[in-house]
Structure formats: C-alpha cells, structure tokens
Image (cartoon, rainbow, N blue to C red):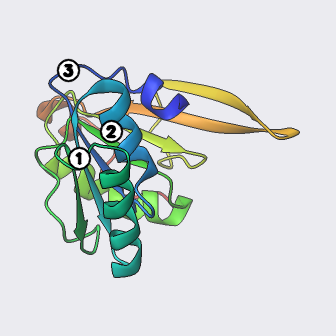
C-alpha cells in the first residue's frame, strides 16, 4: 500500500488511522511492519468489523480500534497518521494534527490535501483507468509553526 510506503515506517512507529472504517490500513501496517497501530472510527459497527479482521489476520495484539470522534480522540502518541477522509475534514483536522503530534510525525493523506500547507511528497498511484494521489507532510518543529511554515488555520 502506497500510503504506508510513503510514510517510511520504522520499527518504533505508532500509526493512527483517523476514520479507520474496516481497519484495513492499521491491520496492514501491523502485518507488514510489525508496528503498533490504532484505528479511530465513529461507527461502532465498523469497529466490530475491524476488530474481527484484526483477530482473523493475527494482529489483534498490535492493533486496537477506538470508537470515538476523530476530532476529540487523543492522537499525541502517533508518529504516523493516515487519512482517507475529504478535503473539508483534512482542513478541519490540520490544527489538531499540528497541535497534538510531535515534530517529525508524518501525515499521509489519500486523495486530499491540507489546503495551503504544501506536501513534501506527492505520489500518483495507478487505480483502474485513473490515478489516485497520496500526499506526505512532516510536522515541523514548534518554532516553525509560529513563522508560518505549516499553517494551522485552514485556508478558504
């Protein structure tokens, strides 16, 4: 999966997938990279599906799924955050990501940008007869936020 490859996952990383749905990204991260992963999902039915898949795939000891609102759930332990949401949600999440994640944490988004915060890498991935786009950002040092390097407010 291109999102995980682009994140350059290391053995001590902790991945958080915001809006994790059926859990495929955290499960794949745990299987491929043997890391801890957390999925945050608001739909309790999808949480049950994800937990069952994690057990089936043999990674339930490394993957946990939390039934919560992704805007309210604490994410500070994440070193990698994956998003497959929408442009609107990415922009609304950006202040939280920059506030709660430590400098150096990587954010990977499928198909949607962070407004005027320019990604460090952009990869186009073939999909059916089209392409999908994956974006990567790294949370900058705290002092860089104050100089405007990574805007914390969404642009309109």
Residue 28 placement (x, y as % from top left): 41, 38
Helix, strand or loop status at disc 1? helix
Q: Quadrant of residue 12?
A: top left
Q: Of the residues under marks 3 and 1, which one precedes in the sequence?
A: 3
Instruction: Tell me what residue is drawn at x 55 percent, y 59 percent.
Output: 87
Q: Is residue 149 visible?
A: no
Q: Residue furthest bottom?
A: 44
Q: Is residue 65 above or below residue 13?
A: below
Residue 104 placement (x, y as % from top left): 21, 27
Q: Nearer the viewer, mark 3 or mark 1?
A: 3
| Contact check, label 1 and label 2, Cβ < 8 Å | yes
What numbered label is drawn on residue 34? none
Pointer 3: what residue?
11
The residues tagged by marks 1 and 2 sit, at their Cα atoms, a distance apart of 8 Å
Instruction: Tell me what residue is drawn at x 49 percent, y 34 percent.
Output: 3
Q: Quadrant of residue 77?
A: top left
Q: Is residue 67 visible?
A: yes
Q: Of the residues under marks 1 and 2, which one precedes in the sequence?
A: 1
Q: Nearer the viewer, mark 1 or mark 2?
A: 1
Q: Nearer the viewer, residue 10 or 33?
A: 33
Pointer 1: what residue?
98
The residues tagged by marks 3 and 2 sit, at their Cα atoms, a distance apart of 27 Å
Q: Of the residues under marks 3 and 2, which one precedes in the sequence?
A: 3
Instruction: Tell me what residue is drawn at x 25 percent, y 19 percent.
Output: 10
Pointer 2: what residue?
150
| Contact check, label 3 and label 2, Cβ < 8 Å | no
């Amino acid at each position: 999966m291109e999102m995980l490859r682009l994140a350059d996952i290391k053995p001590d990383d902790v991945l958080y997938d915001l809006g994790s749905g059926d859990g495929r990204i955290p499960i794949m991260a745990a299987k491929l990279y043997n890391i801890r992963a957390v999925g945050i999902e608001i739909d309790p039915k999808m949480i049950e599906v994800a937990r069952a898949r994690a057990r089936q795939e043999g990674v339930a000891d490394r993957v946990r799924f939390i039934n919560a609102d992704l805007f309210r759930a604490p994410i500070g332990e994440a070193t990698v955050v994956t998003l497959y949401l929408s442009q609107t949600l990415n922009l609304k999440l950006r202040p939280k990501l920059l506030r709660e994640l430590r400098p150096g944490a990587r954010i990977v988004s499928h198909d949607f940008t962070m407004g005027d915060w320019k990604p460090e890498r952009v990869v186009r991935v073939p999909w059916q007869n089209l392409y999908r786009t994956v974006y990567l950002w790294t949370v900058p040092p705290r002092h860089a936020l104050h100089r405007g390097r990574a805007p914390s407010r969404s642009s309109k």
